Image (cartoon, coloured by chain):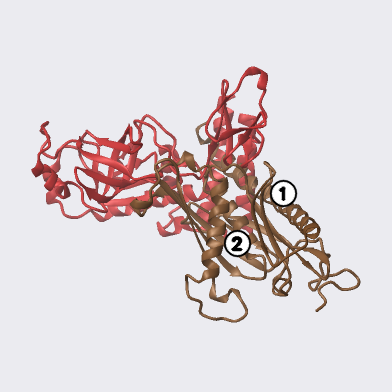
Chain colours: A red, B brown
Amino acid sequence: MRELRVGLNQTQKVRLQSALKQLEELSSRVSNSSTASVTVADTIPVNLEDGVLKGHGTTDHNGEVVATLCGVVERVNKLVYVRTLRARYKPEIGDIIVGRVIEVAPKQWRLEINFSQDAVLMLSSMNLPDGIQRRRTAVDELNMRSIFEENNVICAEVRGFQHDGSLHLQARSQKYGKLERGQLLTVPPYLVKRRKQHFHHLEQYGVDLILGCNGFIWVGEHIEANEDEMMQEKAFTPFVTRRNICLIANAVRVLSVLGFNLSLEVIIDTVEASSSSNLDIKDMLGAEFCVQTAEREVQRRTTLIKKKG
Amino acid sequence: MEFVSPEGLRLDGRRPMEMRQIRAEIGAVSSADGSAVFEMGNTKVIAAVYGPREVQNRGQQLNDQALVRCEYSMANFSVGDRARRPKGDRRSIEISLVIRQTMEACILTHLMPRSQIDIFVQVLQADGGTRSACINAATLALADAGIPMRDLVTSCSAGYLNSTPLLDLNYVEDSAGGPDVTVGILPKLDKVTLLQMDAKLPKETFEDVMELAIQGCKAVAQYIREVSPQNFIFLASVSQLSVI
């Protein structure tokens, strides 16, 4: 386990290992092909008579299908491809992502989104703050820094690849835009699954949670979409909300260190577990809570499998 | 000086065709995209890979493939005398170049156009064969970063002292001034990507020595293939099914 090696004492180590072992067993029971994990240059067993479509992460070598990546073999009908873990984000159109502005260029912002290039957000592909649809003038271009500055964290949607290969984003709705008063967390992108809903408003905590598909996760104070003026007057975030932000952020950190997929239910579950055991927020990152989280995940999956039959 | 005793043992007690113990560990640098530590006996090397990411110097950007960069350095404490070395000395520039070329040959750069991959390798303990250890560490780090590659390059060195071919030279044997052949191969494709030799060797002997080095590379490859999947099977099965 990557970051986790330090800080566990002997019993905790044993408990964690047994929990992870159980998770492995559970997953092999469900998918029956958990051993289909390959390394670079491994031959992927296929039935060539059926016809095979070689997808990402595979090449042909003397008539065999050979992996070019480390990861898990996935098969969809005839298509065979290798899904990597721990690689950078691969954008798909319509993904909701969180990114950081690194440059204000002519008519566009350039964003770091954990992709192999910087993403481009054009001035023309976002709604202006006054909400009027019109042509962008030179004045708008000069005022770009009043919308987003360098190092601002913003949320947007993947619009698509331009013919020159650059990645374009768009932010044509109230829900996209600058994110303030919160924390940005980075996790490996494979932990965030594409869902219908990536924006979550956790009412009992007064917190907004955005699970960006690129592995950037935003935890911040809840902001009503159409209360812009009111928000400007309010200059600080209440202490309770700040505590809650840290609480949820730490839950995400624990889950990502353990390598569990991040979904709203699991995050909330972790948060509730920590508050029911009266844990300090800082102690959530300790070894004991980490082990407990792993054990809870085992239980959760066991019950899920039982329910399914 | 006698490098192979009459009983057929080397200075550190190995047989001529014996390698040092190797150990690899994936994921040593948490902030990097991929990282690995590789040890061959007392030689210890750490490698970190960043990328594919946006090209830092726009002038170097390539529109059909990724730019691969490599930086090799030796820690001050890695050798016996703790001398301050200037950063860009000729030796490290040369090794950076060698590592870069070797890795570039196996990375499928055309899949990541307009991006850059940075490989940083640092020698933590030097005891001969740093070049090979660096290449092995870099391979593992690239595999960890999820960068598509033709094959896992592995490397090993061999030498010829006291008219005996010796596998995997250590520092004492290396500094004896005899020929030192470093070979890098793609084990699956059975191709040589790196071949370097200091000093001269007769043709027949060279073939023996090179064959020995290739055997060493294959042994390293076998070990690497055992290490790298463990990590991935584990990650896969743990993350996979929270959405059963």
User: Where is residue B156 shown, x and y percent of the image?
Assistant: 69, 58
Q: Chain of mark 1?
A: B
Between B183 and A141, the one lying in front of the other is B183
Could you tell whether A220 is left or right of A83 in the image? left
Above or below, comparing residue B202 to residue A112 in the picture: below
Between A171 and A232, the one lying in front of the other is A171
User: Where is residue A307 shown, x and y percent of the image?
Assistant: 55, 27
Instruction: Say what secondary structure mark 2 lies in.
Output: loop
* Residue drawn at x 32%, y 52% as measured from the top left: A183
Dot 1 amino acid type: Gln
Asked whether the viewer can see residue A4, the reply is no
- Which residue is under mark 2? A9
Dot 2 amino acid type: Asn
* Residue drawn at x 73%, y 75% as measured from the top left: B176
Q: Chain of mark 2?
A: A
Residue B222, numbered label: 1
Between B19 and B227, the one lying in front of the other is B19
Residue at the outermost top position: A50
